[in-house]
Amino acid sequence: MRLSRYFLPVLKETPAEAQIVSHRYMLRAGMIKQQSAGIYSWLPLGFKVLRKIENIVHEEQQRAGHIPLLMPTLQPADLWRESGRYDDYGEEMLRIRDRHDRDMLYGPTNEEMITDIFRSHVSSYKDLPLTLYHIQWKFRDEIRPRFGVMRGREFYMKDGYNFDLTKEDALHAYNRHLVSYLRTYERMGLQAIPMRADSGPIGGDDTHEFLVLAETGESEVFYDSAVTDIRLGAREIDYDSHEECRAVMEEFTSLYARTDETHDEATFNAIPEERRRSARGIEVGQIFYFGTKYSEPMGAMVQGTDGQKVPVHMGSHGIGVSRLLGAIIEASHDDKGIIWPEGVTPFHVGIVNLRQGDDETDAACEQLYTALTAAGLEPLYDDTNERAGGKFATMDLIGLPWRITVGPRGLKNGVVELTSRRTGESEEMSPEAAVARVQEIYAPHMG
Ligand code: 5CA
């Protein structure tokens, strides 16, 4: 993309309404625009990152064997009357009436609707196990929408639902989700720690939240510092294996890590003092096992091996896709702007032309642009007439992890400069070497 033809409305001033760094940078970098409290337009740069995050979520869900579909944002109230949640959900639910006086709602989550789909089409244990998911806009009329996309009213969520014959199978689905989530967050350059939590309006006894540690997080958390040493890394997990998924689940959840809702002082105090931590975290996902809470009242039954009809065991599993942008920025920025992890960056590399209009420099930039594009990478070429300082400031703000700087002085010696946004370190090399290096850096992130 050439910056002169892009739509990147960066702001020079810090918007007064933004209290936390991710919100400030998302506004300043021209990623989002607020349209109403907790409701945002996604401008091109923000939309690009949202799509990258969404793609990673899709890939990891499908790797775990989960099947994508798409349910609508608007739902009939009657489904929620069947589960009993229409009254329970309270003020957070946006209730709408259509022209025929039918009660509708903008879905805050989809347990009822997916259960309705299931009961309409599945009646035998032979069709199990089954996990369906979608990535769709949700609406919760939060009393205090704040921090930009972190606590929106309209937000983008991946929600998945497992249907299993037995509790044991459903617990495997729970563990499988836990493992797939760990891989999902790691691919985004995030460490998200599974913590025992409270299930709230979704219900059920077993639930873990995934938390990214950050001072601006809304959740208070308590954990054994040893949990921060564990990574999934490049391990290949057989998602069908109950044993393997359970082993990873135990590895990641046997140490103490809880949100304040489930915190227990006595157990916490038994951890060696130097490893006890209390901190703040951003909840980027949550998994639930709730058994037959929805299948029983809604009649989602299958014929078991003995011919008897039994309600299916279910769980639901959510990832805060739009919130993740905020969480990633909170975890990865400096005083100049965002520092995108390679896995989610909107463009792979920025090209800064130090002498726009100089034939040789322009030609070298064009060549780089063509070579990077041919290598399957997406460069953002700042071909504007802005002075060099302004170009650097914009690149730093929008946070592309790599920048290639091209100027007449370097070109005399046949070199350009490759700079890491994270370390600030620069290295001179030929344009060909720069392309090869950037290609090598991104190789693990290319599909
Ligand atoms: N049905 C279940 C699982 S699919 C569910 O709704 N879970 S949830 O309530 O925990 O939401 C899933 C994730 O969505 C949360 O972990 C959080 O990351 C994100 N989320 C929840 N509320 C908001 C909000 N108001 N703004 C942005 N993200 C949110």
Image: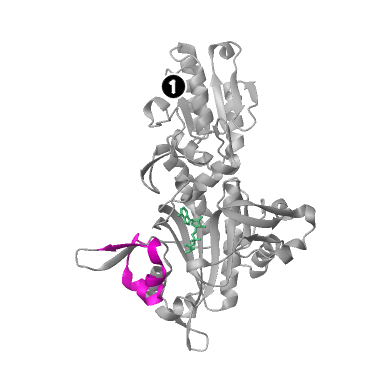
Q: Which residues are magenta?
A: 71-97
Residue closer to the observer: 240 or 137: 137
Q: Amino acid at mark 1?
A: Asp
- The answer to whether one can see residue 117 in this image is no
Q: Image quarter for residue 35?
A: top left
Image quarter of the N terminus: top left
- Disc 1 marks which residue? 383
For residue 107, above or below residue 322: below
Residue drawn 42% across the image and 63% down it: 109
Rendering quarter of residue 299: bottom left
Q: Is residue 186 left or right of residue 14?
A: right
Residue 32 x, y percent position in the rendering: 41, 40
Whether residue 387 is visible here, answered yes or no, is yes
Closest to the observer: 388 or 144? 144
**Snapshot quadrant of residue 254:** bottom right
x and y percentages locating residue 210 in the rendered image = 59, 57
**Residue 401 against residue 163 in the figure, above or below:** above
